[in-house]
């Protein structure tokens, strides 16, 4: 108790209140409101500059943007010309000697037609030939038309094509998907192609399937670019009339006449 000198009565001691701790952990005067706003504005400007800043283009991107094309070596040119010459020669020989080819394959085609379950053999062969860089898919399709006719032959070809392309899709998706993503980041042309294929959806897939590009090569590109499975399957089914034309040619070769009256009759 403390004696109050003025009133002569006892007075209760006043509690000592502790000063509140500063709101800032550092031993500096807290910044004013104007200083805080200025600092926040500066931070926002710095962040926006960091976000808007793009990395420098790679040498391949510079070449693509400036229209610079790499020169093709003479070795690659000769290889390309030889490949085209061989393909043209094969087409000309098949067209010129198609009757002799059908007669030479007659024993094999008769055996396939007479064997129980022989229709499974071209399906397995078509599935195996769906993996690039193998080729010969068209020859098997023509033989299916020559052996089983237009209706059954097209059914066999459709089954082999869908199963083979689906297997190719899954193999390239799981084995080359990571490499494809890395290539997108390094190669601007491939990255642009992958972007167009993903954003183009079903329409782009159908257009590419109907193009002159080999089907199994486009399947590999679709898988590595991340095209959805349902889009790929639907585009494959829609593009099956391309195979129907080859089956029709095989039926025409087998009948010995290329007119629609003989083939369809």
Image (cartoon, rainbow, N blue to C red):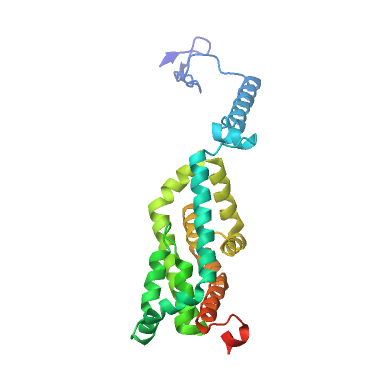
Label count reads 0
**Residue furthest to the top:** 5
Residue in the foreground of this view, choosing between 26 and 191: 191
Name the quadrant containing residue 191.
top right
Would residue 162 be found to the left or right of residue 193 on screen?
Answer: left
Regarding residue 214, the answer to whether it shows in the image is no
Residue 28, percent from left and from top: 52, 14
Would residue 108 be found to the left or right of residue 189 on screen?
Answer: left
Please report the residue visible at 43 percent of the width from the left and 56 percent of the height from the top.
133
Regarding residue 261, the answer to whether it shows in the image is yes
Residue in the foreground of this view, choosing between 160 and 20: 160
**Residue furthest to the bottom:** 265
Residue 116, percent from left and from top: 33, 86
**Residue furthest to the left:** 116
Residue 231, percent from left and from top: 54, 64
Please report the residue visible at 52 percent of the width from the left and 68 percent of the height from the top.
236
Residue 123, percent from left and from top: 40, 74
Residue in the foreground of this view, choosing between 37 and 21: 37
Image quadrant occupied by the C terminus = bottom right
Q: Is residue 197 above or below residue 182?
A: below
Q: Is residue 170 above or below residue 244?
A: above
Image quadrant occupied by the N terminus = top left
Please report the residue visible at 37 percent of the width from the left and 72 percent of the height from the top.
124
Residue in the foreground of this view, choosing between 39 and 125: 125
């Amino acid at each position: 108790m403390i004696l109050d000198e003025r009133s002569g009565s006892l007075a209760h001691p006043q509690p000592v209140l502790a000063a509140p701790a500063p709101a800032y952990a550092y031993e500096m005067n807290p910044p004013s409101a104007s200083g805080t706003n200025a600092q926040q504005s500066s931070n926002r400007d710095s962040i926006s500059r960091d976000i808007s800043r793009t990395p420098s283009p790679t040498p391949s991107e510079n070449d693509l943007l400036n229209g610079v094309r790499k020169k093709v070596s003479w070795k690659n040119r000769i290889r390309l010309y030889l490949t085209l010459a061989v393909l043209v020669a094969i087409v000309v020989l098949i067209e010129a000697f198609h009757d002799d080819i059908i007669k030479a394959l007659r024993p094999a085609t008769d055996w396939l037609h007479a064997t129980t379950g022989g229709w499974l053999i071209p399906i397995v062969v078509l599935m195996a030939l769906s993996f690039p860089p193998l080729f010969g898919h068209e020859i098997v399709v023509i033989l299916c038309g020559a052996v089983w006719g237009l209706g059954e032959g097209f059914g066999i070809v459709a089954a082999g094509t869908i199963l083979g392309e689906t297997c190719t899709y899954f193999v390239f998706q799981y084995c080359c998907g990571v490499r494809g993503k890395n290539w997108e980041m390094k190669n601007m042309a491939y990255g642009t192609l992958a972007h167009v294929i993903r954003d183009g959806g079903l329409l782009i897939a159908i257009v590419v399937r109907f193009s002159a590009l080999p089907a199994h090569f486009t399947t590999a590109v679709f898988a590595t670019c991340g095209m959805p499975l349902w889009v790929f399957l639907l585009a494959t089914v829609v593009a099956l009339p391309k195979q129907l034309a080859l089956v029709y040619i095989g039926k025409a070769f087998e009948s010995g006449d290329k007119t629609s009256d003989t083939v369809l009759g």
